[in-house]
Image (cartoon, rainbow, N blue to C red):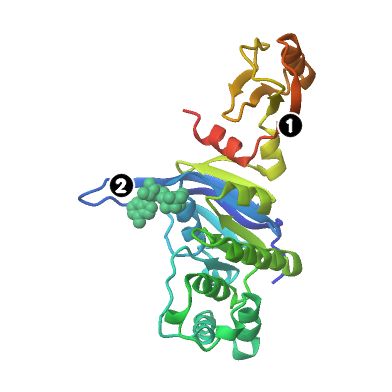
Amino acid sequence: MGQPAAGNAIEIEGLRKVYAGDGRSPAKEALKGLDLTIPTGAIFGLLGPNGAGKSTTINILAGLVKKTAGRVRIWGFDQDRNPRQSRAAIGVMPQELNLDPFFTPAEALEVQAGLYGVPKSDRCTDEILDLVGLADKAGAYARTLSGGMRRRLLLAKALVHHPQILVLDEPTAGVDIELRQMLWRNVRRLNEERGMTIILTTHYLEEAQEMCDEIAIIGDGELIARDRTENLLARMDGKTLVVTPETPAGEIAVPDGVEIAHRPDGAIALTYSRARISASEVLAALAEAGVGIRDVRTEEPDLEDVFVSLTHKD
Ligand SMILES: Nc1ncnc2c1ncn2[C@@H]1O[C@H](COP(=O)(O)OP(=O)(O)OP(=O)(O)O)[C@@H](O)[C@H]1O
């Protein structure tokens, strides 16, 4: 399959999902008309606080949850009109470790390939197991695999039908650093070498900042922000100068718009808006107060600051 016409791997328009209520809980509108496009070839982060609707969105893309209204196009195929093609274009690594304990990794991949109708000649079980570092476990029962190995097997399963789009739902939650780095190396390779579009959700904002070219932040079923990662970071105009004084500093009068905080290690943190005040004005205020400066460094805002400012407006 070539590129989708619009250059977008995913196009979501007016997506709504209402989970029906039951005797105990009322109906819940988890998505309130979400519009979102994800460009082909991106590593795209879908972020949001708990309950924002990330899993619902991903599960609709994966065909696991039925949408209430709206339109979803996957690789140019309308999910309702071309269900088979749209399903074939996407592979999903789920959050839960739902593996059959009696299959070996090699068998699990063969079964998955069968479910997707991949002809025997197009199957590359060994190559995929090698890619995720499970070649030496090809014949071991899934129940004997460690948690990390099971996650890698889930990634392998998502790849058997050669999808153009790979979706990773919280792939590194509760995973040690070594495995996390391995997963990311593999994902980067799939993106760079095969041009695979990657969509991921994560609670680790540092990870999203490092991995994702573009990010959408959703909150309460609606899109709050969507931009290239560097543009999102640039929205935070705040900057912090951290000054280590020669001798412990007392009261310091700072210009309007500068927030001052004394850190436990004796450093003074001065946060200000770059648009309103310059670093030299901030430092001049310290000189005026007779504070000698032993060391000074800056702290840039990170995705965490952007996330907090966008999702905690109220
Ligand atoms: N099967 C369901 N039945 C009823 N309500 C549901 C169901 N699944 C999710 N919800 C509700 O829909 C809302 C969105 O949930 P969703 O799991 O999509 O959020 P999320 O952004 O993935 O959250 P998290 O970060 O906690 O995984 C929540 O209020 C949740 O309680």
* Residue positioned most to the left: 23
x 67%, y 56%: residue? 43
Q: How far across and how far down the image is residue 138, in percent?
A: 55, 86
Q: How far across and how far down the image is residue 314, in percent?
A: 46, 28
Within-10-Å neighbours for mark 2: few <14, some 14–19, many 20+:
few
2 or 1: tag closer to the N-terminus: 2
Q: Is residue 207 left or right of residue 279?
A: left
Query: Is residue 230 in sight in this rendering?
Result: yes
Q: How far across and how far down the image is residue 103, in percent?
A: 45, 85
Within-10-Å neighbours for mark 1: few <14, some 14–19, many 20+:
few
Q: What amino acid is at disc 1?
A: Arg
Residue 189 sits in which quadrant? bottom right
- Tell me if residue 126 comes above or below residue 220 in the rendering: below
Residue 128 sits in which quadrant? bottom right
Count all numbered tags in the image, as a single digit.
2
Q: How far across and how far down the image is residue 237, in percent?
A: 68, 28
* Residue positioned most to the front: 247
According to the image, label 2 marks what residue?
27
According to the image, label 1 marks what residue?
297
Disc sitting over residue 49 in the figure: none
Label 2: which secondary element: loop
Please identify, in this view, whether the residue under mark 2 or under mark 1 is nearer the observer: 1
Marks 2/1: CA distance? Answer: 51 Å
- Tell me if residue 175 comes above or below residue 161 in the rendering: above
Asked whether the beta carbons under mark 2 and mark 1 sit within 8 Å of each other, the answer is no
Q: Nearer the viewer, residue 264 or 303?
A: 264
Label 1: which secondary element: strand
Q: Nearer the viewer, residue 304 or 2?
A: 304
- Tell me if residue 12 comes above or below residue 162 in the rendering: above
x 73%, y 21%: residue? 275
Does the beta carbon of the residue at mark 1 sit less than 8 Å from ligand 1? no
Q: What amino acid is at disc 2?
A: Ala
